[in-house]
Structure formats: C-alpha cells, structure tokens
Image (spheres, coloured by chain):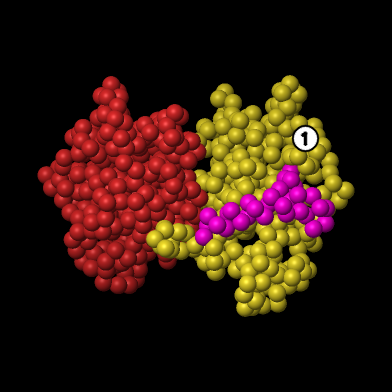
Chain colours: A red, B yellow
Amino acid sequence: MPHRLLPVAAIVASLATAAMSDPLPSWNDTDAKARVVAFVENVTDPASDDYVTAADRIAVFDNDGTLWAEQPIYFQFLYAMDRLAVRAADDPSVLTSDVLRAAAEGDIAGAMAGGEEGLLEVVMQSHAGLSVDDFQADVRAWLDTAVHPQTGQPIRDMLYQPMLELLRYLRDEGFSTYIVSGGGVHFMRAFAEDAYGIPPSQVIGSAGKSSYQIIDGVPTIMKDPGIAFIDDKEGKPLGIDSKIGQRPIFVGGNSDGDFAMLEWATAGPGPRLGLIVHHTDADREWAYDRDSHVGRLDRGLDEGPARGWVIVDMASDWADIWP
Amino acid sequence: MPHRLLPVAAIVASLATAAMSDPLPSWNDTDAKARVVAFVENVTDPASDDYVTAADRIAVFDNDGTLWAEQPIYFQFLYAMDRLAVRAADDPSVLTSDVLRAAAEGDIAGAMAGGEEGLLEVVMQSHAGLSVDDFQADVRAWLDTAVHPQTGQPIRDMLYQPMLELLRYLRDEGFSTYIVSGGGVHFMRAFAEDAYGIPPSQVIGSAGKSSYQIIDGVPTIMKDPGIAFIDDKEGKPLGIDSKIGQRPIFVGGNSDGDFAMLEWATAGPGPRLGLIVHHTDADREWAYDRDSHVGRLDRGLDEGPARGWVIVDMASDWADIWP
C-alpha cells in the first residue's frame, strides 16, 4: 500500500493549528479534513522527513462533480445543446444523428442515450467551426446567463465552496493546482481563472481537433470537428504526463473516471494523498454513486479506503456546499 | 504590421540601464540586444501604455538551433542512434528499414536520407518500449558521457550562453519561459530543468504514443511505437494553444519550423517580439540557413524583418556563444 498512516500526534497537532486559523472553514471538523490538513502540513514542513519542495507540490483535480456540480448532465453539455440549437437554426443539416437532434431540442434524456462517449462527441461536434477566441467568448457569454434546468441557480455559482477553499489553501502552501478533467480544455479555460484561480496553462482536458489557418490575413486557431484526446480514465495519467510531466502528490476526483490518475499518483514514492468526493447529499446537492450515468463511482468506493484515499462524504464532511 | 517601432528615446534609455547592470553580458551592444531589452523594459514598466501583467508575460523558445546546437543533426537523433544500436544488439528485427539500419550503425548521412519526418520516426521508434521514467534515466545517463561527433565537446555543454542569459533575464522580469520544440517532450524534460531552468510543465514538444499500464502491480506510463503529435510548423501554435492556452508575447526560434508560431504570436494585440537566431558563425559554431537539411531558414529571412522580427546574427550579435 502506498498510503502512509500519519501518527495520531500529527493529526492532533494539525487540528490544533487549524483551529487557530482555519484554511477550510466550510469543512466540518471530521477525519477527512484532519487528514487533508495533516498531509499538507507534513509535506510543507522543512523539518519533516516527508518534506516536498514546492516544485514537486503538484495537485490535480477533476472538474465535473469535484469542483462544480455535474447533475443531471455535465454543464458543458447544457452549453453544447444551446449552441447546437443555434447552429441548427442556421443549418439543420448539422443534425446528423438522433443524439444530435435530441440535443438541439434540449431533450436531455434523448441526448444522453449515446452514453458518455456519445455525450463527448455531441460536445465536440457542436463546438466546431469557431475560432478558439470566438468560442471562449461565446462560452463566457453563455455562462453570464445560463441557469440550471432543475434548480434555476446560475450555472456559474454551482461551484463547491469547500473545494474552492482547498484550492486556495494548497496554493497558499506552495502547491501548483491543476484541473485534469474530461471536460473540454477550451471550455474550461473560459472560466477556470475566474472560478478557481487556475490559469489556462494549468487546465488539462479533452480536446477536439484544431487547425492553424490564416483567415483574411489573420492567423487563427480554429476548432474543427472530431476528437483529438479524451482526458478520462487512463487518459488522465497520460494527459498529466503529457502536459505536466510530473506525478502529482495530491489528486482529487469523484468518479471512476478519476481512478487511474488516483492510482498512478498515489503509487509514487513519498507522501501522496488521494481524495474522492462522494455525492451523498440529496438535500443540498445530489446523492449518486454506483448506478449514476454521470460521475459513476463504484471501484473507487470499493478500493479507495484500502488504498488510503480520503473519501469525502459531502453530507457529513462539508458544512457548506455552495459559495 | 503587428510590429510597433519603439521610439529611439526608449532604446537609448534601455541601453543606459543595460550598461549599469547588464542582463545580457554575452550579447554585443548591437541593435538586436537593444531591441530585446527595450521590449522587456517596455512591457514590464507599469507606467508604460504597453505594460503587460506578469500572468500574460509568456515567452516561448524553440530548442534545437535556438537554445542549443543542432548540427550536423539534432542531438536527440544522436541519442536515438546510440539507443537503437543497443536495442538492435538484443533484437535485430527492430531494424525494419534502411533508415533504421543506417541509424543503428551510426551512419548519420544514411539515417538522414528519410528527411525530417523520417528522422522523427526513427526517434520515436527507437524510444519506444520503455517506461517514461526509465527512458528519462537513460537520456540523463547518455548526456553524462555523450560527445559531439565533430567537435568532441560534451553535448550537454553545447548550449548558447546568450540564450541562457535571455531566459534568465526574462524570468527575472516576471516572464514564464517555455520550450516549444520539434524535439521529443520526454527527451527534453530529462535535461531542460538543469540546462535551462525550465520545469517539465513548461516543455512542449513532439510526442510518441504512450499507454497507462499496470506492470507487476506498478502503475506505469509506457512509451509506445508511433507518433502522437509533431510539434513543428503549424503544430507549434497548436501545441501552444493546447498546452498553454495563451498567445505568447515573446517568441524565439531559428528555422522556418518556427515561422507559424512567430507569425501567430506576433500578430496578437499589444506589444510582441519575435526573434530568429541566424546561424552565421562558421568559426565558432556553424553557418547555415536556406539550404540546410536541419534548421532550414528561408521564409523567416525573407519576411522576418518586414514583420518586425529581430534577426540575431550570431557572428556579430553574440560576444560569446558557449557557456
């Protein structure tokens, strides 16, 4: 087992420190919080045997279901449906499949019939034909007004306050924080800096094909049809290796799509922390895991605890959920 | 034209400052140096209309022929030949083409018969079958002893001192410095931090295919046969968009393989600087441009000056070349 149990004394000491100036005020004082704080204090203490230099303090987080909500469907898919409807109004011939037709009609259930890869293809197809700059301006404009189809809450407010605090805490302690998500990299970069304080270069995601073109004399990067990279499951450690080139020491996720990156990162030498957000709060958010079509969490629940991963119970470990 | 001419007063002022504490001591006091220093002082001066916040001070550099030498062949290719010879000694069946056979025999001319894409394929094929960790350990071991086939100089010392100073100067002035090179990303990361002070996450390069595997219970990233991404020509702006997600304001290169990224970066709004290292010094290094099979520079020489790019004449602009 790569996990190292921290001495009780270290946990008690870290709780005492936390009580003085709590970096995670939206977390209840449970074991999950204590283990996170103890880990961070351990790797940042120059006197500790587990001290990690700042250059190696790499922390990566999934986005959908880990940093913001993902029910009843990935929010990028809501954007894709809205955008596809706009495109189809101009040119109905873009709707070449039942899934695309359902998506353009705002029929979430019908659009989801193609499974997760079908969702991603709808996203990629609906996103093509724009420059990256125009696409990101469109995403930002959409986020200014988009509301959740069930709660009516602005989509941009459906971030998890405890995770915002965790990101800030890690950066305050010298960590570099990255997003490593199945979401589209251009989509996430449109808001990651504002929402999470994470700059474009620290956002890793799925990607459609793209091309470099001179359009009316202007060098332009265009989003093209087709999928170039899917940053999910085994794609996550590969994406991290490709873009960061270092194995993270802190990894947060919420679904089995994050299993491989948790497995890889926590198997490295030295101190490592894996964290899984378990959606257990049907009152304040949603409750789902093994049987969910979005953010399915099964193997992580079975194997995570024995691998030393912190399983965050949203209902009991988080005092607040929304900012 | 995206280029803005700087007022003479700004150049004179920057030369005066440079004389007091010269950030680029290996550069002669010519126009090239003056323009680089004036640009950096302009974008870092909060009182300047051209002030750029540190988050947007992205500088990217080609590697082969820009930060270190590349004659008579890319140094990664020398490594590939040595490694292929080792592999072929174990299993001659890996040598499936004339180019591969020539490479394994150390026949540089024969190995170059396949052109630039052939070279890259030899590199990728010879690099497969190792984990990323083992590969990088092998590259570091090779660099500890590898010497140049013509000069006998250690390969690891064939860096350009003026460019090392430029990298340091830019970082001291709040820039983030990246490598964006046709060289292999795993290869360059094995030495980029030591050689240039550039961490793995700021190295963008060509990539072979890779896979995530559990080998004897150990999560491992393996280098596989085949090419996943060629970071050359139009691939360079695409690689920058994919990995950095911001358009650089400072771009250095030396060949037409860098033309697209220079074109794209310097076409952006606000102050921009493109720089081309022109290899003009047959005595201290090599002299080559339009007709070279490696690092061919043709269009950049024709169009660079009118586009406002600084063409660095190694013979006259650099007082020293090697560290």
Residue located beneath label 1 in the image: B26
Query: Measured from the top left, where is residue A271 in percent x and y?
Result: 40, 42
Look at the image and say whether residue B136 sits in the magenta stretch: yes
Query: Measured from the top left, where is residue A103 in percent x and y?
Result: 26, 63
Instruction: Tell me where the magenta segment starts and ends, as one range.
Output: B131-160
**Residue toward you, B184 or B148:** B148
Q: Amino acid at mark 1?
A: Ser
- In this rendering, the count of numbered labels is 1
Query: Measured from the top left, where is residue B120 in percent x and y?
Result: 64, 65
Compared across the picture, whether B249 is left or right of B315 comes to left
Query: Measured from the top left, where is residue A68 in percent x and y?
Result: 28, 45
Question: Judging from the image, what secondary structure is the residue with disc 1 in?
Answer: loop
The quadrant of the image that shows the C terminus of chain A is top left
Residue found at the far right of this picture: B283
- In the image, is residue A271 above or below residue A114? above
Q: Is residue B38 visible?
A: yes
Q: Which residue is at 11% across, 44% downward?
A: A283
Q: Residues within 10 Å of mark 1 (few under 14, many from 20)?
A: many
Look at the image and say whether residue A70 sits in the magenta stretch: no
Q: Which residue is at 31% across, 41% downward?
A: A5
